[in-house]
Image (cartoon, rainbow, N blue to C red):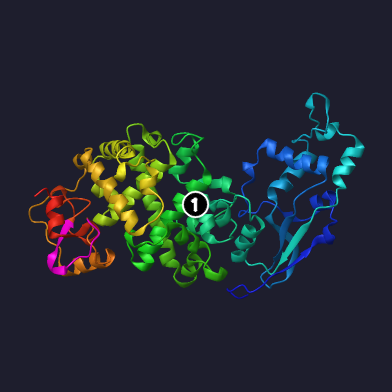
Amino acid sequence: MSDYISEYRTENLKDGKLTIREMLSMDINWHPPGQRDTEANSPERERDFIREVMNYGYLYKMAIAEIYDNNGKFTGEYQAVDGSHRSLALQRFKEGFVGWTPPFSPDNEELVWSELSKEDRDRFLDYDKIDIVIYKDLTPEMTGVVFRKLNDGTKVNEEEYLNSFNVEIRDIVRVLIRGSKAQVKSPVLARLGRHAQHPLFAAMQAGDGLTSSHIKRHKLDTVATKLFAIAWKKLVDGKNIYEFVNSKNLRRSLYVGPNNTQGLWRKLADRDAQLRDECVLEVLDMLDKIYVVMSKAPNGLKSFSSLATFDGMIHHMLGMEIMYDKPISKIIRDSGKYTSSWLAAHEELKANLPGNRKSEYGAIVSGWFGEEWRSKYNLVMKHTLNNGGLESMSIKPLTHRKRYFNASDKTIVWKRQEGVCFHCGKELDWDNMQAHHSPIPHSKGGPTIPDNCELLHVECHEQMHGH
């Protein structure tokens, strides 16, 4: 089957006259790993689905896909594309776990299955307006696109969209975030000896980190996928974090490519499985470091009281590793002191954003990469150092360290800044230009590399140094 999807076929099962009794007896996997997580079903939502059928004779259409064997032959089995929440509610009602409140019931009394009359049970089981659409010739990449189309007009978060693609990277992320609850396995993680939930997310789930009101699984999925995107760019393209364009687009491209072609991750696995494994190991190593550094904060992981601060610290650590080209453990000597200074900078920045704007700290460290990300990272780094972060760093100023940027360094920065001054934004003249160590000054151990450089007019540089 071609990587490029030009068409797929659909048909309605029994012309929309399938009964609930028949549907529940079919060989349909309503809860494949890529489906939306049915654990998110609330009791009230399940009751709503039952009321739709029993009170109003209505149930939104559901979609399934035929399953084929390796020879392309239909196996007689089906897999859900959309509708797992509704199917689970119907099943749980029949099994007595969900109740139904009849219209005009005295005292709003709720009845479970065993309390229903035979007439009401048959009315439920014989409900025959379930419009189930069968998708034929549907590839894993196309499944996510169809899922998005079916939910057009409803709120589909990024995790739901990406998880609808039955691809390897999805399973890796889900295992790391949720462990066995993800209902998937990852041969890659198993082969690398890290096939269980990562301790960082296990601690969060156990209540050692964010409170339950702050933990939104799709946000954690986004954090993990972002790490994979960064590792992919770093190892495959040799790019640094400042050269990213848009994190959301990059994360999606790992799962699925333009025109529903294979995603970057699958292409990488097919072309160079060893490099793919190196990406996984890079992420596992980074997660280990994040866990160690964050857990040594004054109040442990609870110090990161929101996903904005959690995500922000990860951005910051990534930036430091890329800037110094060293593991975070070689940069930070005292994790407890460093996280204390970082958190202090976080509080300070809330009330000291440029232009007298007030915002949550997440607005500084999230969103776009590229030059905007770099300016945000610079701001965070400067405030962290001013709050005592330098005292906890193992990077010390050395008199013999390289101080001046060479022509090659300046050319890289010139292209990044598109030939304008980083300070005033006006056009730079190569003969009236100086290189400035930022965000980490040379006197504070800042490396003389393009990632720690800003090109300024001579007069702007003098202003920066207070001359």
Return the x and y of residue 223 as percentages of the image width and height: 44, 50
Q: Is residue 368 magenta?
A: no
Label 1 amino acid? His
Position in image of residue 434 (x %, y %) = 14, 61
184 above or below 206?
Answer: below
x then y, percent, for residue 356? 31, 41
Query: Which residue has dot 1 on it?
Result: 195
- Residue at disc 1, secondary structure: loop
Q: Quick check: is 428 in the magenta stretch?
A: yes
Q: Is residue 259 left or right of residue 110?
A: left
Residue ID at (11%, 48%): 466
**Residue stretch rendered in magenta on the structure:** 424-436
Residue reaching furthest top? Answer: 107
Q: Is residue 144 above or below residue 443?
A: below
Local packing at callout 1 (Cα closer than 10 Å; few below 14, some 14-19, many 20+) is some
Outermost residue on the right side: it is 119
**197 with respect to 363 (left or right):** right
Q: Does residue 420 appear in the picture of this structure?
A: yes
Q: Compare residues 46 and 355 and report the one nearer the observer.
A: 355
Please, which residue is most extreme toward the bottom here? 2
Relative image position of residue 203 (x, y in whole percent) = 45, 38
Q: Residue at x 47, y 51 (%)?
A: 222
User: What residue do we see at 85% from left, 45% from top?
Assistant: 125
> Does the rendering let one see residue 194?
no
